[in-house]
Amino acid sequence: MRYLNFCPKKEIFFEFKNDLKTKKAVERNIEIIGEAVNRIVKKSGSVVKIQNAKQIIGTRNRIAHEYDNISDEVI
């Protein structure tokens, strides 16, 4: 999982869930990536293929617009 790049070694999911700073950083990065994928897909049409683009954009939208309903397991 990518969030491990932001955490100390031997980080476990329970500690991730309780580390607000790390959670917010991970959520923000997912938002940025999702927005970038969305722009690439819109600008390139069918020229550039991004695997799982709909899921990436959907996750970004859930974080950005449904922040009160996002579980840590989804992130």
Image (cartoon, rainbow, N blue to C red):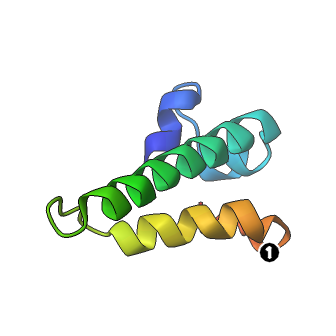
The quadrant where residue 56 appears: bottom left
Q: Is residue 65 left or right of residue 44?
A: right
- Which residue is the extreme one toward the left? 47
Extreme residue in the right direction: 68
**Residue 41 rendering spot, x and y as whole percentages:** 32, 62
Q: Secondary structure at mark 1?
A: helix
Would residue 2 be visible to someone looking at this image? yes
- Residue 21: percent from the left, percent from the top? 77, 34
Q: In terms of depth relative to the viewer, which is nearer, 74 or 59?
A: 59
Label 1: which residue?
69
- Residue 49 in the image, given as x and y percentages of width and height: 18, 63
Foreground residue, 22 or 62? Answer: 62
* Image position, residue 6 (x, y; %): 56, 29
Specify few, some or many for label 1: CA neighbours under 10 Å numbering under 14, 14-19, or 20 or more: few
Residue at the spot 77% in from the left edge and 39% down from the top edge = 19
- Residue type at the position of mark 1: Asn
Q: Quadrant of the C terminus?
A: bottom right
Residue at horizontal 37 percent and vertical 63 percent from the top = 42
- Figure quadrant of residue 25: top right
Q: Is residue 72 visible?
A: no
